[in-house]
Image (spheres, rainbow, N blue to C red):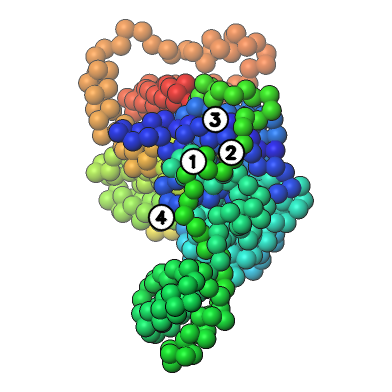
Amino acid sequence: MLQAIGLTSNPRRDRPPAVDDLTFEAPPGAVTALVGPPGAGKTTALRLLLELDPGRGLSYFRGRPLHRIAQPAREVGIVLGDVPGHPSRTVRGQLRMLAAGAGVPVARADEAIRAVGLAGLEGRRLGSLPRGAERRLALAAALLGEPHALLLDDPGAGLSPEERGRLHALLRAHADAGGTVLYTTRDARDAARNADRVVTLDGGRLAAAQDAGEFARTRLRPRVVVRTPQAARLAAAVTQEARAARRPVEVVTEDGNLLLVYGGDCAQVGDTAFRHGVPVHRLADETGESRPAGVGEEAAPGPLPGTGAAAPDRVAGARRPVRSPLRPLRYELRRITGVPSTALVLAGALAVSAVLAVLLGRGGGTSLPAVLAAWPDLLPLPPAALGAGLIGALSFGEEYRYPALAAGRGAVPRRLALLLAKLAVSAAVALVLGVLVAGADLAALRLFYGADLIIVPDNWHAMTASWLGLSVGCAWAGVLGAGVFRAAAAGVAAVLFVPVAFVPLLRQVMSGPAVRSVAGLPARLGEFAGPRWAPPLDRWIAGALEVVAQPAGVALLLTLTVLLCAYLVTGVRRQARW
């Protein structure tokens, strides 16, 4: 049972609220349609139900508010527009990523594909799907968690009659299995044909809540639809004969060649057209929407049992339901591997690094670390670090550009588990990229100039720690920068800020003489740890300390600390407003 009690949206400037004191219910095992003209408040009502918009009132899903349901995707499936996915992602890849977000087995993706009739389109890119397939993909995403309730905002918009028929067949099957279905539509005939119950909105208020049969009887009236190239002539003839026979009739002309005749039947209109020699291309009986009744013309249901008569003062939407992935690491792995941008960045970094390494090694005046890193003086960062930073920035940038996690296409959930997953995956990719780039550059140098010129230095531990630390630090700066400022470009800017602006400043600060030194720290740690201390750790710790002591290392650590604090603070503030 889905219950809405006193839903009222926040008032708008110089205008009444879009939804005002709306109370209705959608029973299980039935399809309920929310009907009204454009601007009646249908979409706002759904968003209030889902606690996506601020306002007053209560909404219950089988007796529980949505923000108290631990796994919302298993209680309610939502279709608010199209599925916001990356155009390069495949249908199967998108649904498998969303399955990880919903915490359901990956096999549910293939089951949902078959259920909505997308079999054969699993490998199609989202950007190449036709309109009907996009709507079926949105429904498949809503069905991933096997929810009890389905909430859909105008699901048949832009679909052909055949596609709408398939869509309503799926909704009917869900209701027949005991589920709850609530969808919005502006077409009263659609609601009368496909729904069991119809809730009518007028100006944001409840006009009626009826069974579909009663709705068709009280809100729809029969009419004859005629399509003819001589619409004006036939309209005049029908009106003239109706007056002569003293029959009430109303003739409405639409689109120039379409007549809607209220108060007659097909036989009467056809005979009139025949007598006046008017060609008819279409002649059919159907039901059309009557004038919307004012609020209160039909008996509106009273307060639901046990709720009281007054509208609740509790704020609907003050606490949003949790939308973070229940399996964040699996979600992030599927997200980063499901688009070609990751492979393109990795391949580009490898190719550019190899070319720069060969060019730097040709002169012989560049140090070996700079040659292996492919880091000329004119670049603020080596290609591998820039590539790692770009991959990190895209990890959050794509979330905000294609917000697949949020039902209302709002902010990406700022949960610690999601952040840790992105940091872990971006760090792993950065480490792999750093190792691949070093290996590719070394192989290119040996191929062009021979192996005798490449001599491994004694401080290779510090070099390795510096190289991998720089790659991981840039990746994390990209993740946090994009997460704080909600754009991939901001993440890249955060990566470039360290060498361009911060490092020169720190070099001036650290140029003075040092009073104290941390020399001997590895030995003191070994004494503290006792026999469990492994001697090789001395070299790695010394290398790490040498890296951190450099201006670039200090600048990167400070930048990451500031970005992490900013991310946590902004996340706390947004959660407080929810």
Label 4, residues with CA under 10 Å away: few <14, some 14-19, many ≥20 = some
Tell me which amino acid carries mark 2.
Ala
Q: Earlier in the sequence, mark 1 or mark 4?
A: 1
Q: Earlier in the sequence, mark 2 or mark 1?
A: 1
| Residue at x 43% of width, y 13% of height | 519
How far apart marks 4 and 3 lie (CA) works out to 57 Å
Write down the residue under mark 3. 6
**Residue 557 lies in quadrant:** top left
Write down the residue under mark 2. 300
Q: Secondary structure at mark 4?
A: helix
Foreground residue, 327 or 164?
Answer: 164
Foreground residue, 63 or 75?
Answer: 63
Location of residue 148 in the rendering, given as x and y in whole percent from the top left corner: 70, 43
Tell me which amino acid carries mark 4.
Gly
How far apart marks 1 and 4 lie (CA) works out to 64 Å
Horizontal side, residue 377 vs residue 303: left or right: left
Disc ID at residue 295:
1
Q: Nearer the viewer, mark 1 or mark 4?
A: 1
Q: Secondary structure at mark 3?
A: strand
Q: Earlier in the sequence, mark 2 or mark 3?
A: 3
Relative height, residue 78 to residue 576 (above, below): below
Q: In the picture, which quadrant includes the N terminus?
A: top right
Q: Earlier in the sequence, mark 1 or mark 3?
A: 3
